[in-house]
Image (cartoon, grey):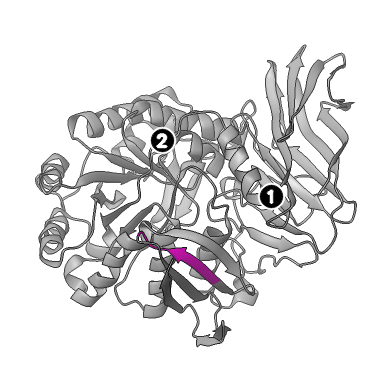
Amino acid sequence: MTFTFKSAKLIFDQESLDLIPDKTSSSEALYADFTSLHTDAHDRFQIFIHPKKEVILKGFELRFSVPLTLNTSVFCNGFLPDHRSGNYLLSEKRSGRGWLSAKKKFRQQAPIFPNQGPFCSFHYGFAGNETKGLFLGSLNETTAFTSIEYDAQNQEIIVRKDIAALALGHSFPLLDLLVGTGKKETLFKNYFSAIEGPRFPAQPVTGWMASVAGNGNSALAIRNFLVHRTEENIPADFVLIGAGYAKEAGDWLFSNDQFPDGLPTIIAEIKAAGLKVGMNISPLLCSTTSDIYRQHPEWILKDETNNPVTINTASGLFQVLDAYDLGVQDYLQVFCYTVTTQWGVDLLKFDHLSAAFATPRKTKTRAQAANDFTKMLRNSCPDAIIWATDLPTATGWLYANYTSLTSDLLETWETRFPLLYADPNAATARIQLKNLLQRNTYAQYGTAANLITLAATKNLTEAQQFTILFINALFSDISVISDASEQLPAETWGEWQAVKQWKLARVTSVNFQTEDVVIINFKNSDGKKFRGLINLGNKENSVDGISLGAGETLILGSKKS
């Protein structure tokens, strides 16, 4: 597939400026350097903006002429981990939101651009097939996030930057874009190799989580798990202490009455059992009954009307702390130092990180806010294992060992009354498992997906729970179960033991036969081939001639290679 530069335009104040490759373009308010580098492997386009005075940026568009047709397959990468991702034909009509579905707030929304079409991808995108296609990927997502739109009608690909309403008075690296044609796998691997920065180690691991919903989240529940782990030979590399341990959300250094001897005592017991220890917090959230809220009202983030910003989560409604407040940063730095250096915690799971851009800021883009806050967390615990959730993947790659690619919690298989409550980003197993399967598998970074439950539930069948377990084991580097250990029979723990084998397996192909039917081919560590036949639909489907119920998986073996 070919591409040709068509135009580039920067919009600011009450004017616009056309940008030309390998030229400096200027106006009375600013000038911009636009450079291009052409190699046999790819082309690279870079733009730097240099204001002569403060300007208000309104938008940027870079257009390429590309021979797209309605039969072209394109990859759309969701903005946040739970946002819809996958491969689509440009002839498809993408489903929208039901009229009774909840309205998304700023932090939950993907950036919206004027005259935006339905087929957009964030950070990177691809058009074509496995053997021949066009790849575009941003090498700088720290200053502004990148949107890539596929427009078949005008045979264009439009690259935009999330800079609307940004007040800028200093030099600004706007764009660093890699564009290449060829084999899909080669293009993706070249892109991920070209991203600068450290690669944090992400070994395939399994763990058990102490959670309020799953097992009560108490010192007693943890001790029970340590006993059952020995008796049942339960695979686990670490114990994750869920956020419900805290006296109140926001008071992360103080445990509640379920930990009568304090956290350091139970942490020492976990490590004595030969396991690593993790802690789970939402660093920017606090409850109105917390000491943090009462003692530091100046830390609470306010919106444009000076009202407190709140976030509604599965655990309730919380206030948001201002990520740029120095007091908030000092508090979180002390937390990280205390738990990692003094208590010996190995892993920190940071949730709701998009709260860093919970409200628009005059002098910061979403990307800058996310990058600045996540970088601060990494610098506060440089040797810890970080698991980042609710964060654009490009930011997570820079600072986390594991970056979530889906919603954490999967409580149902399908949205109830989907015509009314349809949400393409819903935290349902059908949607989120498709995200995990269709997001790029060539990324050289640690990935995380869903928390696992195998205990009986009225909203998920045993077959659906097994499907969630199987897909997570193959495609997520970190797998965590949260059931009370004494509630699961030995045969169920046997299913969990298979996770270790699947994590060592190598996926050779993922083939969607239809929107809901997928076949996964993989090899175990001994080279034996397997096929996973999966029905991701909400009704019975035939998979390779075999009838499977809604959410059912069948694993078939074959001869050793």
* Residue at left offset 63%, top offset 51%: 77
Q: Position of residue 104 (x, y in %)?
A: 60, 54
SS class, disc 2: loop
Judging by the rendered image, the residue that carries numbered circle 1 is 183
Q: Position of residue 316 (x, y in %)?
A: 40, 56
Left or right side of 154 for 158: left
* Residue at left offset 42%, top offset 23%: 326
Q: Spatial distance from mark 1 to mark 2, Cα to Cα?
A: 27 Å
Most foreground residue, 92 or 195: 195
Left or right side of 192 for 258: left
Left or right side of 440 for 118: right
Most foreground residue, 143 or 313: 143
Q: Position of residue 327 (x, y in %)?
A: 39, 24
Q: How many marks?
A: 2
Do we see residue 263 in this rendering?
A: yes
Q: Tell me the number on the disc at residue 200.
A: 2
Do we see residue 461 in this rendering?
A: no
Q: Quadrant of the C terminus?
A: bottom left
Badge 1, how many Cα within 10 Å: few under 14, some, many 20+?
Answer: some
Most foreground residue, 259 or 495: 495
Q: Please state the extent of the stretch shown in magenta in the rendering.
A: 519-525
Query: Residue 135 appears in which quarter of the rendering?
Result: top right
Residue 220 covered by magenta stretch: no
Q: Give the prevailing secondary structure in the magenta stretch.
A: strand
Q: Amino acid at mark 1?
A: Lys
- Height in image: 151 above or below 47? below
Query: Residue 453 appears in which quarter of the rendering?
Result: bottom left
The answer to whether marks 1 and 2 mark residues whose Cβ atoms lie closer than 8 Å is: no
